[in-house]
Image (cartoon, grey):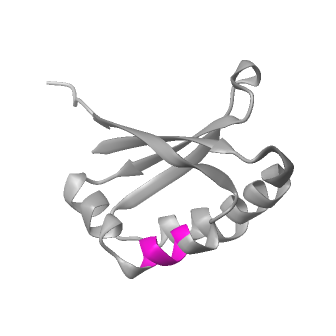
Amino acid sequence: MLVRILTMRVVPERLDDWLRFTRDVGFPGMLAQPGCRGIWRLHKAEDGMDYQVVTLWDGRADLERFRASEAMRLLSAQAAGLTVPPPAETLYDVVPDP
């Protein structure tokens, strides 16, 4: 399993648009991808307009397949103007119990 944390700065006057986009388009689009098991939006009040989107993947190959897909290009195009690029990405391998 792989956890991806994408940190992005939302354009302040577009926050409601970004929240609607993630709820109605972005998150359903991600969950439709093979290997995407879950998605969450996180925010700490002291982080201002920085938000984290956390996704859980079956593995790195699934994430790479999504990154190279037309679905990724389409979702990115639809989200244009809602955040300030570039986002920061951190990947974590889930360590199973022995």
Q: Is residue 62 left or right of residue 49?
A: left
**Which stretch appears magenta?**
71-76
Residue at 65% from the left image edge and 71% from the top image edge: 25
Residue 87's x, y, as percent? 50, 45
User: Magenta-highlighted stretch: main secondary structure?
Assistant: helix
Q: In front here: 59 or 6? A: 6
Compared with 97, 1 (above or below) is below
Residue at 74% from the left image edge and 48% from the top image edge: 11
Compared with 50, 84 (above or below) is below
* Residue ranking furthest to the left: 98
Tell whether position 72 is magenta: yes
Residue 62's x, y, as percent? 27, 62
Tell whether position 18 is magenta: no
Please tell me in which quadrant of the rendered image residue 28 appears: bottom right
Q: Quick one: quadrant of the C terminus?
A: top left
Q: Is residue 11 left or right of residue 7?
A: right
Compared with 46, 35 (above or below) is below
Residue at 27% from the left image edge and 45% from the top image edge: 1
Residue at 73% from the left image edge and 35% from the top image edge: 49
Q: Is residue 41 left or right of residue 11?
A: left
Q: In front here: 48 or 66? A: 48
